Image (cartoon, rainbow, N blue to C red):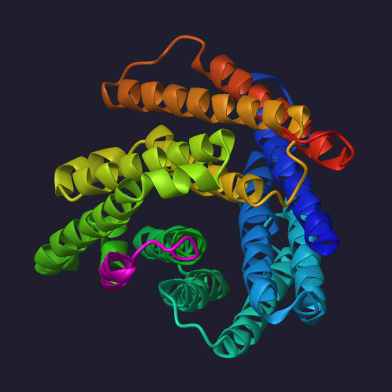
């Protein structure tokens, strides 16, 4: 468990660094910071968030899933993969700031892809060694498949850059391809797999949880086209997109129904603080599904994707509101770090920052759609970035103080 705890602390440090980069991005918008290239810093921020925080931590949690069934010695088998992924994350953190998309940043990006693929092969084989057949195994397997598929997007972008292709539609479709299969594939399916494991190990009936998996899995690929509704050919498969939206809503209903019917069992298993974090993540995911349902309307989709604050708000809703809060809740629920007062305070400040940030981005987005400017909105968003950074800094420092009495 000490091995796991140390890696979790590194992940929390990485999350703090993500928030620091976000702070610098907001600072540069409000104040002068001429020696930092905004675009390069944005690439560093996003790549490090994906690889250094989300992917790194999900891999750690999946390894923990294996260790609970195959023994803690399994950690040594994955040590070099975690180090390789960590090196690639820090390499991208620095190289993207210094040079943007260039030789070194592409090399580190490629290393992260290789590390993930090797992890996928190892994890798949070790998953086969577990005798119990649960629904969480299906979520894990397809999370890896979608994670590998997502990397076709960056490779397509690299090829287009190599041949100097300037078609904006192809660039956007490649970017959204990567984002979709990361957010709605690798991140979502790995997270729901961890959630299913929490539910099934507490003797909650899994029949409807299997239904939920099949619905989400069937919807994942067609749901990608919701991101590119402006392309002419998408109209010919519009019915399929509607079916994908309905399938995801139905799948989420089955999961929520199972949780609600067994709420008394679950209530006894988790601390009040962990339950609040899971609930907030669930609310954020519900909002995400409702927004996705609204985007099925072509005109509304084109309108929303035409305004940057709405795109940024949606991405942060999924990355922070759904994924990050769930991961932190999972870590807290299984006591992978000592849940001290400073840890609880840091998480609470972070959650407040997420909510404030989303509300401000929503206000900014709605105002932009009405072609209005919200006074001092950039200063307020900078304030939200400060809150996020303070919260995560407090959380990381609190996680290092393992001798404090748990709450």
Magenta segment's dominant SS is helix
Q: Is residue 105 above or below residue 321?
A: below
Rendered-image quadrant of the C terminus:
top right
Tell me, yes or no, whether the highlighted magenta stretch contains residue 207.
yes
Q: Who's the residue at 69% across and 25% down the image?
A: 345
Of all residues, the one furthest to the top in this rendering is 375
Is 331 positioned to the left or the right of 322 in the image?
right
Vertical arrangement, residue 278 with respect to residue 112, above or below? above
Displayed quadrant of residue 199? bottom left
Query: Can see residue 312?
Result: no
- Residue 272: x and y in percent read 54, 34
Residue 400 is one of the magenta-drawn residues: no
Q: Residue at x 46, y 71 (%)?
A: 136
In the rendered image, the vertical position of residue 188 relative to residue 213, given as above or below: above
What residue sits 28% from the left and 42% below the top? 291
Which region shows up in magenta? Answer: 200-218
Question: In front here: 397 or 48?
Answer: 397
| Residue 302: x %, y % from top left | 24, 45
Judge from the rendering whether residue 297 lies leftward or rightward of residue 174; answer left or right.
Answer: left
At x 77%, y 33%, the residue is 340
Q: Nearer the viewer, residue 262 or 300?
A: 262
Rendered location of residue 282, percent (x, y) = 40, 43
Q: Is residue 293 left or right of residue 335?
A: left
Residue 398 seen in render: yes
Q: Nearer the viewer, residue 202 or 355?
A: 202
Badge count? 0
Q: Is residue 94 left or right of residue 360?
A: right
Q: Nearer the viewer, residue 289 or 383?
A: 289
* Image quadrant in which the N terminus is located: bottom right
Whole-percent x, y for residue 195 in the image = 48, 58
């Amino acid at each position: 468990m000490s091995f796991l705890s140390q890696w979790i602390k590194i992940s929390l440090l990485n999350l703090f660094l993500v928030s620091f980069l976000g702070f610098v991005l907001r600072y540069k918008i409000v104040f002068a910071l001429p020696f930092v290239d905004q675009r390069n810093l944005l690439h560093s921020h996003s790549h490090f968030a994906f690889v250094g925080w989300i992917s790194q931590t999900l891999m750690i949690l999946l390894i923990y899933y294996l260790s609970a069934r195959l023994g803690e010695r399994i950690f040594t088998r994955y040590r070099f993969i975690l180090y390789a992924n960590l090196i690639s994350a820090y390499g991208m953190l620095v190289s993207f700031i210094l040079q943007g998309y260039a030789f070194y940043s592409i090399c580190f990006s490629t290393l992260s892809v290789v590390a993930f693929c090797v992890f996928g092969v190892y994890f798949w084989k070790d998953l086969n060694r577990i005798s119990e057949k649960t629904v969480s195994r299906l979520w894990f397997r397809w999370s890896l498949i979608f994670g590998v598929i997502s990397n076709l997007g960056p490779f397509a972008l690299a090829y287009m850059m190599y041949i100097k292709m300037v078609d904006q539609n192809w660039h956007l479709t490649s970017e959204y391809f990567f984002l979709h299969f990361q957010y709605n594939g690798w991140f979502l399916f790995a997270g729901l797999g961890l959630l299913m494991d929490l539910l099934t190990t507490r003797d909650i009936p899994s029949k409807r949880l299997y239904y939920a998996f099949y619905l989400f899995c069937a919807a994942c690929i067609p749901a990608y086209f919701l991101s590119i509704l402006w392309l002419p050919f998408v109209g010919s498969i519009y019915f399929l997109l509607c079916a994908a939206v309905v399938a995801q809503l139905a799948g989420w209903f089955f999961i929520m129904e199972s949780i609600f019917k067994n709420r008394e069992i679950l209530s006894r298993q988790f601390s009040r603080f962990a339950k609040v974090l899971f609930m907030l993540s669930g609310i954020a995911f519900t909002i995400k599904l409702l927004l996705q349902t609204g985007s099925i309307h072509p005109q509304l989709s084109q309108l929303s994707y035409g305004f940057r604050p709405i795109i940024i708000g949606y991405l942060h809703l999924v990355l922070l509101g759904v994924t990050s809060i769930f991961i932190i809740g999972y870590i807290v629920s299984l006591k992978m770090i000592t849940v001290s007062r400073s840890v609880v305070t840091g998480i609470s400040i972070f959650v407040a920052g997420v909510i404030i940030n989303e509300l401000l981005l929503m206000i900014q987005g709605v105002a932009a759609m009405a072609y209005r400017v919200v006074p001092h909105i950039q200063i307020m968003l900078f304030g939200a970035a400060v809150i996020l950074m303070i919260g995560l800094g407090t959380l990381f420092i609190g996680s290092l103080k393992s001798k404090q009495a748990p709450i």
